[in-house]
Image: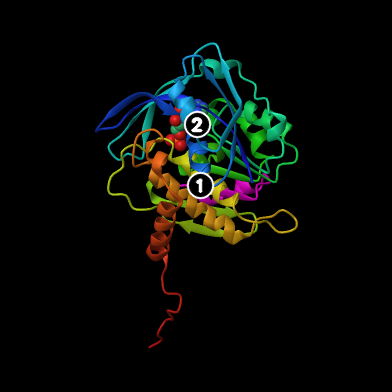
Amino acid sequence: MPILVVGSVALDGVETPFARVESVLGGAASYFSTAASLYDQVNLVAVVGSDFPQEYLDFLRNRPINLSGLQVEEGKTFYWSGRYHMDMNSRDTLDTQLGVYADFHPVIPDEYKHSPLVFLANIQPELQTEVLNQMPHARLTVLDTMELWINTAKAQLTEVIKRVDILLLSEEEVRQYTEQASILKGVRHLLSMGLQYVVVKLGSYGALLFGADGTYFTAPSYPLEEVVDPTGAGDGFAGGLLGYLSTVETDAQGHYAVDDIKRAVVHGNIIGSFVCADFSIDRLRTLTMDDIAKRYKELVVYSHFDPTWRPVHL
Ligand code: AMP
């Protein structure tokens, strides 16, 4: 089942306490497409400038990623740069230049319109809305965003949240958006806006899943000895989540089983862990389904505990 994604395709500059790279392939939609294309076909909607390197276009084209919806416009590609702190979980944004995104309006090619799964990756909320308006028959819609849009476009973001099925946010973003110190209270507020699920990403600690039906599930992260660059881990997470869902059946009403949503969150954590192992999308270039299956099995062992314990009453 093909997955449609709209989001940034960017050139990134990244600085960690240990290394630095400049103008590498980045952007939420790049990470997402590279990850999700391990599972199924991705239909990409984005824009790049005339400075976008041919080598990156070729990389995307050589995967099961449809580029009919990728516009190439005269001007500069979206540019983002950030610097990580020693803990490699928190970062400062140093620069954001929208470039050709400033005048971009997504146009969904006819051949994309049957995509049952839609991922609205991080981009201006108005553009996410424009995509939803062109995809009235989507089966599952998933939304991501970031601090910048919570601070500068909250009303527009609220309109998109009300129209999607699943929202992905970091713990900090839940607090910023809902203005609640408690994640549980914040998530309750978000679910009251009509979402089916909220996924709270905890960086190197994993992710939490909350359902409107009362579902609560906690998925541990895969333990990494070395984090090279966490940029794009959230977008890779979304790629694993939607990628996995593209491979399973829904019920007759088009709903996914809760167990599949839980497995999808585990796939998200696994792909996120691989993204962190190198700069840009580099670790994903050689990633295989066998690598994913190996980490899946390990995570089952790491998070399983004995359900038969009973208290001994003295
Ligand atoms: P993540 O680490 O998952 O938050 O994703 C980082 C990616 O998001 C980087 O590759 C950036 O190019 C991209 N990005 C950063 N800021 C923005 C923004 N304001 N809008 C869209 N994409 C962005």
The kind of residue on which mark 1 rests is Gly
Image location of residue 118, percent across then percent down: 64, 40
Image location of residue 309, percent across then percent down: 42, 79
Residue picked out by circle 2: 60
Image location of residue 36, percent across then percent down: 53, 42
Q: Earlier in the sequence, mark 2 or mark 1?
A: 2
Gap in Å between the C-alphas at discs 2 and 1?
17 Å
**Is residue 146 among what the camera can see?**
no
Q: Which residue lies at the image location 43% right of the left edge and 63% below the top edge?
A: 300
Q: Which mark is residue 149?
A: none
Q: Assess whether residue 193 is covered by the magenta stretch.
A: yes
Residue picked out by circle 1: 240
Label 2 with label 1: CB-CB less than 8 Å:
no
Q: Secondary structure at mark 1?
A: helix
Q: Which residues are magenta?
A: 182-201
Does 120 sit left or right of 273 as displayed?
A: right
Q: Secondary structure at mark 2?
A: helix
* Figure quadrant of residue 44: top right
The kind of residue on which mark 2 rests is Leu
- Neighbourhood count class around disc 2 (C-alpha, 10 Å): few under 14, some 14–19, many 20 upward: some
Looking at the image, residue 63 lies above or below residue 205: above
**Is residue 300 among what the camera can see?**
yes
Looking at the image, residue 276 lies above or below residue 7: below
* Figure quadrant of residue 283: top left
Q: Which residue lies at the image location 42% right of the left edge and 27% below the top edge?
A: 25
Of the pair 120 and 42, the residue shown nearer to us: 42
